[in-house]
Image (cartoon, rainbow, N blue to C red):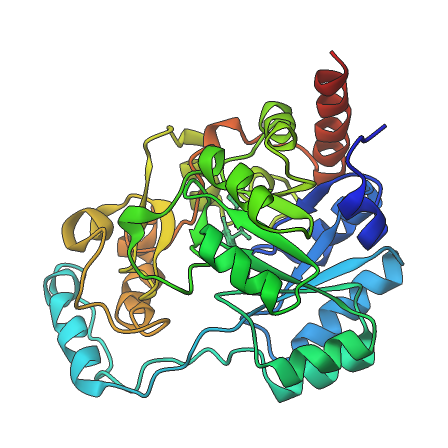
Amino acid sequence: MWRDRRFLDLVGIEHPIVLAPMAGYVGPALTIAVSTAGGLGSVPCATLSPDAARAEISVIRQQTDRPLNVNFFCHMQTPPDLVRDAAWQARMAGYYAEYGIEPAPASPSGQLTPFGEAMCALMEELRPRVVSFHFGLPEARFRQRLKQVGCLIIGCATTVREARWLQAEGVDAIIAQGAEAGGHRGMFMSDDVTTQVGSMALIPQVVDAVTVPVIAAGGIADARGVAAAFMLGASAMQLGTAYLRCPEAKTPAAYRAALAAGADDATALTNIMTGRPARAIVNRVIRELGPMNAAAPAFPGAAAALAPLSANPKAGASGEFSGFWSGQAARLARAIPAEELTLSLARETLARLAG
Ligand SMILES: Cc1cc2nc3c(=O)[nH]c(=O)nc-3n(C[C@H](O)[C@H](O)[C@H](O)COP(=O)(O)O)c2cc1C
């Protein structure tokens, strides 16, 4: 079976396939399907309240007792900046006029609470096997509490420097997120997207720099990619975009259609949707205001001015104002049930590695 068992034995799963936690798009059905197939099911909690996170985990635990990866953002919160928010909203004036939208006056940017006391207490109570973090790590006192109740901690690195720092802070495994990845860059030591590293170069260099198991993420969507990441030294692979077309994903129809049509060069790294760099399918607003724009309010504030446009039936219908996150391998994603996808990825990868 699998030659590299480091991550499998650490976490207690059968196959080295991790369902990427994807806030807003992964719900219990997808998590349960991947867990049932023997992969690691993830529960994205970045946009959930503690009560909603508790409810999701309870639904999952009624169906499976396999290990779970519960995921959080731990970005630095910035003070509200009304002047910046109003200036950003003013940039949308032409779009609002075009679609007859009367936006509410700019108010302090919507905040997204990073991992803190309430979620830490919930994790102490629910004790998932893995707690993973995007955008760095929370304070050491929270991590100590998680470790005390037996949770493994996983962090995400986009450079060797970030990986070394995560290991020095005591994480149990490290995600190496290549520049091909869909969604937000986990980068936390730099904000320069032009120097972000592709998976082929990043994975072996992170593997060489740390002793903990490395999980490859970014642009992996079929068994060829999973096998290649193994050859580069990764012990497991985290796939996001590949699962967005599964029937269990909460991906809306227009987003599914855009993924199905996605060419290799259909995406770009952009900060205009939320204020932090993320890889998304290029749409009208990214073309016209981005992809990178220094005026975008800090994460997640940039999203507020776009919200009335993406919610508008006419303006928003085909995603021209929405963040349709996607990696560069969307074309390889298959619209099949997630359990079948996970099992076939495992089977086909093993066949390739044996050949
Ligand atoms: C729609 C979408 C949402 C995402 N949301 C999260 C999230 O909530 N937490 C997180 O750690 N990573 C998130 N990511 C990043 C993934 O964990 C992972 O790095 C990425 O999907 C890997 O690249 P791939 O999409 O090419 O497989 C998201 C990615 C996508 C595509």
Q: Position of residue 9 (x, y in %)?
A: 85, 48
x 23%, y 83%: residue: 106
Tell me what residue is drawn at x 33 percent, y 35 percent.
266
Residue in the foreground of this view, choosing between 133 and 205: 205
Identify the image quadrant of the N terminus: top right
Rendered location of residue 192, percent (x, y): 28, 56
Q: Is residue 6 left or right of residue 219?
A: right
Residue at horizontal 29%, vertical 43%?
282
Who is closer to the viewer here, 58 or 197?
A: 197
**Residue 77 image-quadrant placement:** bottom left
Q: From this viewpoint, is residue 24 visible?
A: no
Find residue 244 and report its image quarter.
Answer: top right
Left or right? Give the position of 28 relative to 233: right
Total marks placed: 0
Decide: is 352 above or below 135. Answer: above
Q: Residue at the far top: name it.
A: 355
The quarter of the rendered structure image containing the C terminus is top right
Seen in the image, is 73 located left or right of residue 300?
right
The residue nearer to you, when weighing 178 against 6, is: 6
Q: Horizontally, is 192 left or right of 182 in the view?
A: left
As displayed, is residue 258 above or below residue 11? above
Image height check: is 180 above or below 150? above
* Res. 59 visible in picture: yes
Task: From the top left corner, tell me how far across and down residue 195 is, in percent.
Answer: 31, 48
Tell me where residue 213 appears, x and y as whole percent.
69, 48
